[in-house]
Amino acid sequence: MSDGERAFLARLNPPQREAVTTTDGPVLMLAGAGTGKTAALTHRLAYLVNKQLAWPSEILCVTFTNKAAREMRERVGQLLGDRVEGMPWLGTFHSIAAKMLRRHAELVGLESNFTIIDTDDQIRLLKQLIQQAELDEKRWPARQLAGLIDRWKNRGLNPADIDAAESEAYANGKGQQFYRLYQDRLKALNACDFGDLLLHMLNIFRKEREVLSQYQQRFKYIMVDEYQDTNAVQYLWLRLLAQERKNICVVGDDDQSIYSWRGAEVANILRFEKDFPGCKVVKLEQNYRSTPHILGAASGLIRANSERHEKTLWTEQDAGEKVRVIGVWDGPEEARRVGEEIERLEGEGADLNKVAILVRAQYQTREFEDRFIQIGVNYRIVGGFRFYERAEIRDLLAYLRVIAQPQDDLAFERIYNQPKRGLGAKTLEAMHRHARANGLPLAAASLQLANSDELPKRASGTIAALMRDFLRWREMSETVPPAELLRTVVQESGYEDMLNKDRSAESAGRLENLSELARAMEDYETLGDFLEHVALVMDNDASDETEKVTIMTIHAAKGLEFDNLFLPGWEEGVFPSQRSLDEGGLASLEEERRLAYVAITRARRRCTIIHAANRRIYGQWTSSIPSRFVEELPDEHVDSETTMTGGASLWRAGFSDRDDPFAHVARDAPSRAGSRGPGWQRAVASGYDATPKKLPESRRSAASFAAKPRTDIAIGDRVFHDKFGYGKVTGQEGNKLEIEFEKAGTKRVIDSFVQAA
Ligand code: ATP
Ligand code: MG
C-alpha cells in the first residue's frame, strides 16, 4: 500500500475500508442514514483508479441526482489530484442511458440526434392521438394515459408485453393500443421520453448480444448509490450489465426507500444477496452525521414500521441538543418563528448554506418565502420552482393582472386560451394585428374583433364570453376581498375544472398551490396591494455567491445533510399527507414514515420539528392535530416547547370527551387507542386546541404570543364563542375566561375566541 493510499483509507472506518478494498465480486452495503455509504462509494471509485484496477472510463457509477454526480466527481478529484478528467459514466440512470442510446439509436429505429421530450410534450402528443382516435379526452385524460405508460416503462414492459388485463386500465382496454401508437409516433418524430431512455437500452441489451457484451467488457466495475430506490427497469438493466464480471457494488438503506410512487421497488436491495450469491455484505453502524439525540429520535420513529431490517446506529458525537418539537398557533406563526430562528443563527455567525427547511409538499414553501422576503433572509428553492413562478400560479396571477390592468397584454396572452377554449394561433394573430392597427391593448382589440365578423363565429363567441367574465370579475374586485375574487376566477374560468379532470398526481399539487395562493391573498385588502407584493417577491434575486437558506422537499433532500434543519407542518393531513391517509393503507403510511426518517436524518447538529394548531385551508380555519410521527418520537430525545400560553391542563379543561382532538388518531391506529404515550401529552402540552376558528389577524397574533387579558370583556358579560355558542362570563384569569355556555355548560376558553354579544 502506498503512502497516499494509506492516507486516504485512514479516513475510513474498518467496514468502510473493507467495502472499498473488496474489489472482486459483488458487494452490498445496506446501512442506515449518515453511516458513510456515499463516502465509501466515492473512496472506492478513487481507490479503483488509484490502484489502476480500472480507468475512470471503465467504471459505471450511478448516483440519484445530477448534483450528487457532480459532488462525487469533485470529491474523487480531491482524493486523486487531477487524474479524473474523464468520468464519462458517472451520472444518473437517465444521463448514462441517454449517452449510450445516442450511440445505438439506429437499433431502435431512432437517429443519434433524437430529441428527449418533456412531460408537456408527452401530454400534447398523447392528446393528439386520443383526438385522432375520436375518443373523449375528458373521459380518458391524456395524463392518465401518460402515467400508465410511464409505469409500464418503469417496469421494463414494451407494448407487446401488455396483456389484456393491464390494457383495461385505459379506455376500456385500449391501453396497449395507445401505448403502441405513442411509441410509433415518437419514432416518427425521432424522439423519446424519459422512460424510453432506459427501456430502449434494455431492449438493445436483450436483443443485441454483442452490444451487451461490449458494455459488459467495458465496465470493469459498477457502483450504485441509493439502490433502495431503483425501479424494475433499472434493476434489469444493471443485472444484465453486471452478469459477466459481477463486480457490482450497491449501497442503500431500505428505511430510506421513498420513491415507490415512481415505481421504485425496495425489494431490489433486499434480494441482492440472492441475485448475486456469495456477495460480500458490509454493515455500517457508526453514524458520522448527526448527534445522538437526532439519531435516537429518527431510529425510534422508524421502529414503528413493520417491514424492515433492524439496524443499529451509534455515534461518537456529544449528545448535543434534543430534537425540538414546537407547537405554534398557525401557519404564519410557523414562518415567523423559523424566520426569527434563522436571524438568530445568522447573528451567531452560522453559515446559512447549512440551514434548510424541508417540507412535505411544494405548496408549503410559500409562507416561508413571503416571510423571508419580508425580513430579508436570502433563500433558494431547490428542485422546484419558487412558489410564484409555478405555472398554475403564474396563470392565475395573469388573470388577476388582466382584471386589475386591462392593458396588460402579456398577461392576457398567457391566459386567453388557458384553460383551452379553442382559440388558436390564428385568432391570436388576428388579435395582435387588430391591436396594432388601432393602437389598442390586446384585450380591448379582441373584444372589438369579436363584435366584428372578421373571426369565425365560434371564436367570436368565445372571446365575447371571456370578456364578459373579465368585466364581471373587475366589478367584483371593487367589492369583494382579493382571495374571494381569486376563488371565483379559479372556478368560473374553468381552471379548476381543468385540474379536476386531470387525474395525474401533479394536478392535486396544483390545486393545493392555488388554495395556498388564496391563503396568501387573505392578508391583503385590495387586489392592487397583493399584485404589488407579488411583483416585489418575484424580483428577489439574490446573487449566487450570497449564503442562502435552502427550502426544498424532503424527497429532493435525499443523501444531503445540513447543520440546522427545520421540519414544518408535522400535522395529520400534511405529513402524513392526506392522500396517504385517504387511499394508501398501511404501505403508504409506512412510506410517509420513511420519508420522516429521511427528513430527520438530514440534520447534523440541530433539528426542529414544528406543528401548527390551525391551518387556513380554502379560506377556512381548520384546526389540525400534530402528526402521529410527533407522537412516535421517543420522549428522551425530544424537547417540547410551545409558543402558546397556558398549561396543558388548562387547555384541556375546555374539552369534553366528544371534543377529543385525538379521537381520529385512535380510529386510525387502533393499537395505540388505549394507551396514549408521552407524545400525546406533548402534543397537548404544545398547545393543541380543537376549536375551529376564524380570527382577524390582530387577534391571532395576540392569542399566539402572550397572555394579554382582554379589557373589553368583564365578568357578567354575555359573549359568543365560535364553537360553544352564547354564554355568560363567570370568571377571568389572565387570558382565560370561565364561561357558562347556554348549551355547552361551563368551560374555560381563551378570551380571543369570544366576541361580546
Ligand atoms: P445517507 O443514507 O443519508 O445517504 P450516507 O450513508 O451516504 O448517508 P454519507 O453522506 O456518506 O452517509 O456520510 C455522512 C457524513 O459522514 C458525511 O459528512 C461524511 O463526510 C461523513 N463521514 C463518512 N464516513 C466518515 C468517516 N469514516 N469518518 C469521518 N466522517 C465520515
Ligand atoms: Mg448517501
Image: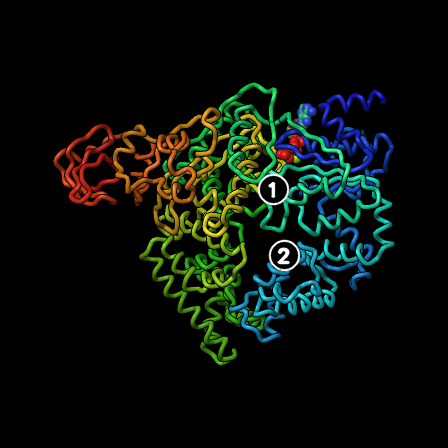
For the residues labelled 2 and 1, the Cα–Cα distance comes to: 18 Å
Q: Secondary structure at mark 1?
A: loop
Closer to the N terminus: mark 2 or mark 1? 2
Q: Residue at x 41, y 41 (%)?
A: 670
Mark 2 Cα shell of 10 Å, populated few (<14), some (14-19), many (≥20): some
Instruction: Pinpoint residue 165: horizontal percent, then vertical percent.
Output: 61, 65
Residue position marked by numbered label 2 in the rendering: 151
Q: Amino acid at mark 2?
A: Arg
Q: Which residue is mark 1?
A: 257
Q: Quadrant of the N terminus?
A: top right
- Rendered location of residue 255, percent (x, y): 59, 38
Residue 205 in the image, given as x and y percentages of width and height: 80, 54
Report whether residue 437 is seen: no
| Image quadrant in which you'd find residue 40 | top right
Q: Quadrant of residue 610?
A: top left
Q: Nearer the viewer, residue 160 or 358?
A: 160
Q: Residues within 10 Å of mark 1 (few under 14, many from 20)?
A: many
Q: Quadrant of ligand 2?
A: top right
Give the side of residue 373 with respect to residue 204, left or right.
left
Q: Residue at x 65, y 42 (%)?
A: 228
Q: Position of residue 118 (x, y in %)?
A: 65, 57
What residue is drawn where x is 71% and y is 61%? 158
